[in-house]
């Protein structure tokens, strides 16, 4: 920084000398940018009172942010002036000032006092001044002044130059204020644009401000429905760390779902059962040092509001015996949930004036049927009284004309699988729409069919049911549905209009449906496989297919059986990829090597041919790697090796899985390279399956080289050239310079339920190499007898430790004694024992024997699918890092709740399926899946201790048990 100060001083003198004879203009002077934004005239710049201040500011922002402007309006940075002198001056102010060209610079006088605002180049349009950012917690208030502007747009910009929030505010008495709340902790700047009716001003940049991090707080917990609570925080939370628990009367309740808001500042906790009167304790943990518990008092569900329609719809008119009319009503509970169909409104007493008689009430639809000597336009009063809740409602009702179809809108062609309609699948489609009467009330199918005549203008394209309109279900809940029928015995391509004509008003509605000819495979091209093909292997053959319209064809149903294949000595067929909803072409190569032709031809005679170079059958050829084997032992120590410690490749360099298939043909032979394993002994020489374990024991100082090779079981024939070698060194006490025990993780006192932690003790050589120490040489003495060490496993365990009152953690001292050649070595380690019960931290998904998980999608064969096998694909991690199993494949663990959503039954029984897909939500005792078939799909969400995880499930074709 001394060089910069020297440069500033020298340059100041040079500027004075070169400009001494000039007649200075008002804009001439020095502009210090960056976060400073000060303007100095020549007099104030060279004032002795400002020299120290200017040098500090210039050093803070750098000389490339200090700009000199001469009397002719030319400018240059001090960096450039120092390097090039007056040649650096340019009239391109934008090139010199950049984004600061229209910024406000506070002028500083000769005494160092700030004054008016100066801009290097006045901005076009209205200008804002006196900009200020006042921070209060996570809220910032931007203020300023402006002349000739009506509105000001203020934008908050984060440190990555991304817009965070924008507000446009009115200018009042030449001042404006814009408030921004709920800003996350971090550094920000802001931009201001003033505008009037004629033009917008230029963007003006404000100074940087910082929002400090605030301590996370639980603002409130409230009951928001009959089955849920809402937890609100003061800031966005880390959803992966948040844990929730709800208790009533000290009993933990099952959470069926935890759903966070988009801004992560609130979470809705849903229960599987309704709330009842009493106090609920909602606990939030994982986000703050201490768990936070809020108690919420809840009342039993009750009637809170009744709404009556303004109009009673005339259903019949008879001046002699009396007219009939219907009034619609809706009932709501204290959470504003509609409960019209529930039993809560049974206590409502409906009262009418003399002459108005209630003839019926349909509580499932919320319709009161009345009769009176009345006509359209007459008025009467209805009073509703609910004695239990004290609710009283009075409303004036006008009798209106009979309801007729007022409008039909939002027409669309619907197919559950989003297919395109053609002459083969007309019956899989329906026209869906919405209808309302003249009063804006939704119309049901029965009323629509009663009034409207619905026809197909071309029944050879698509026909209709005798009762054409039905109430929608599932995806079409709340809509009306016109199912299309495929005409028999034949149907044609073309366009038909679904016409709807009112028999009462003559109103008409129309929707056109265009049906194409069945798409047929027109072109089909196969390509050579992208992987090596060995004899007898099955590989995927890439292909492209298109119909007569040029549209790509990928679905199994549209391709299977439509292509004629020729594959001498091999086989080729389409398989259904249910996960990706497409066909894949699989080729099983002949059992002998050679070049083989594959041809594919379409029904219209178009052909595609490839040759596949089938290599010799793959065989296990080389042990390519020995891994994760401790290769430095002290005398008396040992190391275990198994199949998992080796990698094998075939003759083509492809990995060979060491599973039952491999060990059905081969075994691994382990032996000393020199034929005698004396420095390190072997417990056995053969690894014949995935569970075999060999023990390598250090007998004496030295190095033993081992050779691992592949041997064919038939005839015990070694595979030539398959071996790999690895060394195991044995050291004595003189080689070990240090003995070390790793820090020990916190031990949960689990009362003998299985929580244990590792105690790792080892030696180190001078070069830092770790040396395994014989367990027989390690003795562990605990200051608490309830903390024990098992030398055979190297594990520490804590069971029934005595804690002081209100104590949840206790520090226990371990004295570790290593018996070495040079005498005992003592190591001391502190270990924390806790009785704080583990809590679930996260839930993840994993592949299992039955379930394949990839990218949030689980695929499972139909004959293996049960709730228990599916839940086995989920596992948790608790606060001590232990894995929490949710299912063993047969039984779901207690406390796990399963929710199914988004079910798609690929082939219900009505369409010829074997069964209807049925999914039952619940816990271990109740969750169930029945009727699943290949192609079915649904979402499964598991919930435990407030944590959730969801997978999309695709059901595949049955496989071998």
Image: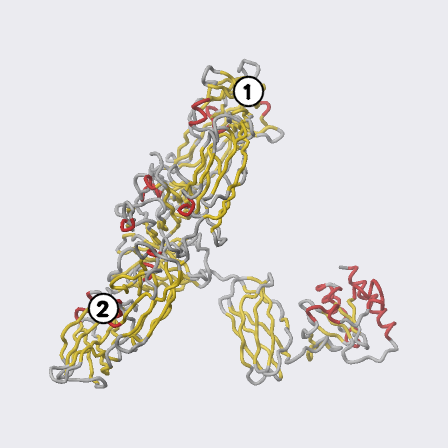
Q: Would you identify the image quadrant in which residue 531 lies? A: top right
Q: Secondary structure at mark 1?
A: strand
Above or below 933: residue 151? below
Residue at left offset 54%, top offset 40%: 527
Q: Residues within 10 Å of mark 1 (few under 14, many from 20)?
A: some
State how the image is colored.
secondary structure
Pinpoint residue 294: horizontal percent, then vertical percent: 35, 60
In the rendered view, would you say 892 is above or below 300? above
Q: Nearer the viewer, mark 1 or mark 2?
A: 2
SS at mark 2? Answer: loop
- Tell which of 189 and 371 is nearer to you: 371
Residue on which disc 2 sits: 365
The C terminus: image quadrant: top left
Q: Is residue 911 left or right of residue 688?
A: left
Cα distance in 3D space between marks 1 and 2: 82 Å
Taking the image as shown, residue 468 lies to the left or right of residue 576, namely left
Which comes before the other along the chain, label 1 or label 2?
Answer: 2
Residue 707 disc label: 1
Q: Residue at x 56, y 17 (%)?
A: 673
Q: Nearer the viewer, residue 767 or 139?
A: 139
What percent of the width, then of the height, locates residue 849? Answer: 39, 36
Residue 125 visible at all: yes
Residue 363 placed where, x, y %? 20, 68
Q: Residue at x 43, y 38 (%)?
A: 573
Please state if 530 lies on the left or on the right of 910 as rendered.
right
Q: Residue furthest top?
A: 676
Pointer 2 local density, CA inside 10 Å: few below 14, some 14–19, many at least 20: few
Picture coordinates of residue 763, whole percent (x, y): 55, 29
Q: In this rendering, is residue 168 above or below 854?
A: below
Give the residue at the far left of this rendering.
321
């Amino acid at each position: 920084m001394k060089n910069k100060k020297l440069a500033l001083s020298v340059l100041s003198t040079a500027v004075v000398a070169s400009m001494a004879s000039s007649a200075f203009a008002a804009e001439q002077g020095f502009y210090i940018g960056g976060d400073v934004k000060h303007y100095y005239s020549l007099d104030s710049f060279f004032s002795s009172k400002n020299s120290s201040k200017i040098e500090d500011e210039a050093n803070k922002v750098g000389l490339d942010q200090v700009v000199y402007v001469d009397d002719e309006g030319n400018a240059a940075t001090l960096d450039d002036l120092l390097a090039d002198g007056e040649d650096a001056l340019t009239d391109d102010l934008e090139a010199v000032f950049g984004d600061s060209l229209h910024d406000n610079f506070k002028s500083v006088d000769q005494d160092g006092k700030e004054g008016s605002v100066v801009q290097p180049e006045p901005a076009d349009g209205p200008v804002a001044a006196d900009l200020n950012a006042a921070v209060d917690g996570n809220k910032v208030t931007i203020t300023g002044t402006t002349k000739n502007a009506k509105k000001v747009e203020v934008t908050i910009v984060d440190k990555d130059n991304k817009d965070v929030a924008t507000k446009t505010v009115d200018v009042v008495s030449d001042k404006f204020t814009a408030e921004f709340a709920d800003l996350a902790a971090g550094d920000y700047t802001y931009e201001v644009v003033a505008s009037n009716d004629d033009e917008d001003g230029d963007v003006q940049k404000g100074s940087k401000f910082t929002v400090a991090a605030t301590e996370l707080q639980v603002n409130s917990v409230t009951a928001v429905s009959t089955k849920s609570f809402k937890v609100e925080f003061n800031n966005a939370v880390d959803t992966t760390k948040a844990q929730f628990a709800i208790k009533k009367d000290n009993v933990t309740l099952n959470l069926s779902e935890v759903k966070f808001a988009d801004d992560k500042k609130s979470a809705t906790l849903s229960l599987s059962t309704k709330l009842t009167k009493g106090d609920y304790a909602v606990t939030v943990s994982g986000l703050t040092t201490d768990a936070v518990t809020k108690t919420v008092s809840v009342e039993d569900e009750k009637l809170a509001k009744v709404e009556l329609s303004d109009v009673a719809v005339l259903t019949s008119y008879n001046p002699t015996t009396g007219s009939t009319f219907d009034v619609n009503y809706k009932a709501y509970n204290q959470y504003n949930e509609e409960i019209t169909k529930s039993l809560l409104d049974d206590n409502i007493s409906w009262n009418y004036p003399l002459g108005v008689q209630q003839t019926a009430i349909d509580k499932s639809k919320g319709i009161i049927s009345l009769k009176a000597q009345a006509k359209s336009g007459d008025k009467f009063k209805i009073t509703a009284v609910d004695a239990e809740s004290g609710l009283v409602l009075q409303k004036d009702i006008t009798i209106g004309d009979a309801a007729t179809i007022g409008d039909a809108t939002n027409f669309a062609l619907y197919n559950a699988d989003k297919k395109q309609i053609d002459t083969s699948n007309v019956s899989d489609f329906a026209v869906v729409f919405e209808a309302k009467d003249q009063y804006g009330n939704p119309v049901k199918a029965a009323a629509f069919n009663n009034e409207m005549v619905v026809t197909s203008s071309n029944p050879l394209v698509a026909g209709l049911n005798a009762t054409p309109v039905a109430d929608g279900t599932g995806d079409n809940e709340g809509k009306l549905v016109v199912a299309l029928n495929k005409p028999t015995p034949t149907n044609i391509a073309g366009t038909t209009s679904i016409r709807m004509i009112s028999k009462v008003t003559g109103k008409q509605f129309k929707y056109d449906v265009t049906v194409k000819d069945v798409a047929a495979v027109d072109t089909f091209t196969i390509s050579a496989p992208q992987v090596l093909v060995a004899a007898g292997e099955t590989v995927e053959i890439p292909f492209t297919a298109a119909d007569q319209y040029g549209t790509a064809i990928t679905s199994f149903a549209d391709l299977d059986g439509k292509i004629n294949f020729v594959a001498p000595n091999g086989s080729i067929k389409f398989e259904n990829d249910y996960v990706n909803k497409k066909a894949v072409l699989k080729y099983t190569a002949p059992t002998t090597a050679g070049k083989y032709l594959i041809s594919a031809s379409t029904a219209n005679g178009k052909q595609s041919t490839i040759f596949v170079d089938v290599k010799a059958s793959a065989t296990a050829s080389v042990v390519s790697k020995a891994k994760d084997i401790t290769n430095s032992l002290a005398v008396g120590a040992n190391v275990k090796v198994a199949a998992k410690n080796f990698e094998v490749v075939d003759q083509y360099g492809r990995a060979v899985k060491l599973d039952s298939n491999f060990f059905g043909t081969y075994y691994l032979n382990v032996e000393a390279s020199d034929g005698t394993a004396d420095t390190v002994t072997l417990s056995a020489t053969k690894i014949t399956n995935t569970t075999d374990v060999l023990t390598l024991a250090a007998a004496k100082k030295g190095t033993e080289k081992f050779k691992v090779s592949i041997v064919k079981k038939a005839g015990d024939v070694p595979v030539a050239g398959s071996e790999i070698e690895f060394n195991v060194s044995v050291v004595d006490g003189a080689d070990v310079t240090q003995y070390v025990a790793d820090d020990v993780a916190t031990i949960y006192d689990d009362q003998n339920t299985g929580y244990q932690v590792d105690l790792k003790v080892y030696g180190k050589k001078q070069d830092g190499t770790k040396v395994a120490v014989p367990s027989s040489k390690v003795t562990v003495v605990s200051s608490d007898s309830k903390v024990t060490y098992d030398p055979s496993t190297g594990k520490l365990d804590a069971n029934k430790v005595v804690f002081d009152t209100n104590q949840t953690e206790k520090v226990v001292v371990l004295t570790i004694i290593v018996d070495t050649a040079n005498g005992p070595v003592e190591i001391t380690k502190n270990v924390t024992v806790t009785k704080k019960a583990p809590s679930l931290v996260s839930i993840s998904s994993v592949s299992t024997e039955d379930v394949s998980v990839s990218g949030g999608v689980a695929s499972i064969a139909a004959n293996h699918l049960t709730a228990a096998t599916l839940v086995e694909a989920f596992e948790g991690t608790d606060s001590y890092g232990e894995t929490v199993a949710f299912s063993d494949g047969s039984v779901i663990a207690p406390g796990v709740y399963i929710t199914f959503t988004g079910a798609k039954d690929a082939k219900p029984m009505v369409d010829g399926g074997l069964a209807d897909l049925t999914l039952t939500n619940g816990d271990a005792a109740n969750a169930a899946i029945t009727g699943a078939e290949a192609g079915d799909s649904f979402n499964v969400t598991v919930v435990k201790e407030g944590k959730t995880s969801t997978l999309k499930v695709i059901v595949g074709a049955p496989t071998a048990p």
